[in-house]
Image (cartoon, helix red, strand yellow):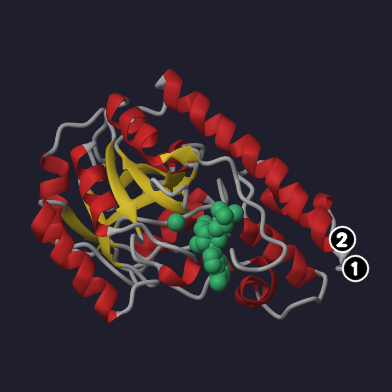
Amino acid sequence: MRIDLHAHSTASDGTDTPEELVARAAAQGIDVLAITDHDTAAGWHAAEAAKPAGLTIVPGVEMSCVHYDEDGKRTSLHLLAYFVDAEDEALHAEWARLRESRLHRGEAIVDKLVAAGYPVSWQQVTELADGGSVGRPHIGRALVDSGVVPDVNAAFRELLNSRAGFYIRKADTDVFDALRLVRHAGGLPVFAHPIARRRGPIVSDDVIAAMTQAGLVGIEVDHPDHDADDRAHAAALARDLGLIPTGSSDYHGSNKTTDLGACTTSNESWERLIALPAARSPMR
Ligand code: AMP
Ligand code: ZN
Ligand code: FE
Ligand code: FE
């Protein structure tokens, strides 16, 4: 089976609608696809309604989280919440707060770019996001449309990455609060791209152990932002901590060069995941 447990649609910063996403998955011979937009479950319904025969859809949400160590050092990190009850009041409120924070922060980044003379506008960005969770890829796309950079990747490399002068933080959820919220809402939390160093600082193995104590069930091992050493390290961590190792493309349509199924999850990990009790079931 080909199992891809992390993909974005136009409900956040992907470029395929949920309908296009599930059609593409089926066309590429994928058997199981998770739709995991940033801080929203808005794409689930359309994905399920358009589900081609033979494709299994996993409802998921990728939550933007933050961890502060004892020295106050801040690390941002992403949790995938699978099979979670999207109607859970506390979680629903937290996602709404995160999306609101994305709006203010997106506008503030655009303000900085405009102040530096770049020909982009907030209106351009909100039109591109079209009601979905706003993210830096939308700003990147606006920079492409305005002819500032040739592609979204260049926009990140030159202007939008977390080490660049235009970067502004979002008001993300403390990762231990997020784990509690997700578990309370019957979800299965998996740590997305835990060792993606090129995005910014990463948390230590001790933090991942503490997250496991707090209800984490898996970690992404095979991910496009992990090199061979990162994957070996994540696989060893999964073994040591009893976490389910997963693999995923983190597909974003034409906002990234990675295609669906670029990294996949083993049948064994999939069986372990769906054996755990959760609020929702796979959409078969
Ligand atoms: P944000 O959620 O607004 O902080 O933006 C982060 C998103 O940008 C993540 O979903 C990443 O997948 C995406 N991203 C990070 N680096 C790049 C890149 N070099 N090219 C395209 N997308 C990227
Ligand atoms: Zn994204
Ligand atoms: Fe992510
Ligand atoms: Fe993602």
Task: Tell me the SS state at disc 2.
Answer: helix
SS under mark 1: loop
**Badge 2 vs badge 1, beta-carbon distance below 8 Å:** yes
Q: Residues within 10 Å of mark 2 (few under 14, many from 20)?
A: some
Assign the N terminus to one quadrant of the image: bottom left
Q: Residue, x 25% and y 40% (percent of image)?
A: 282
User: In the rendered structure, which amino acid carries the disc numbered 2?
Assistant: Val
Q: Quadrant of the C terminus?
A: top left
Q: Residue at x 64, y 48 (%)?
A: 134
Q: Farthest residue in the front direction?
A: 71
Residue 232 position within the rendered picture, expressed as x and y whole percent measured from the top left: 19, 74
**Residue 83 placement: quadrant:** top left
Can I make out residue 74 in this image? yes
Q: Amino acid at mark 1?
A: Gly
What x and y, as percent, mark residue 250?
A: 41, 62
Q: Residue at x 67, y 50 (%)?
A: 129
Q: Give the labeled residue for mark 1.
A: 117
Q: Position of residue 116 (x, y in %)?
A: 87, 66
In the depicted view, which residue is nearer to us: 112 or 33? 112
The quadrant in which residue 30 appears is: bottom left
Q: Residue furthest top?
A: 89
Label tally: 2
On screen, 51 above or below 5? Answer: above
| Vertical side of 85 occupied by 169: above or below | below
How crowded is the residue under tag 1: few (<14 C-alpha within 10 Å), some, or many (20+)? few
Residue at numbered disc 2: 114
Q: Position of residue 234 (x, y in %)?
A: 22, 65
Q: CA distance from mark 2 to mark 1?
A: 5 Å
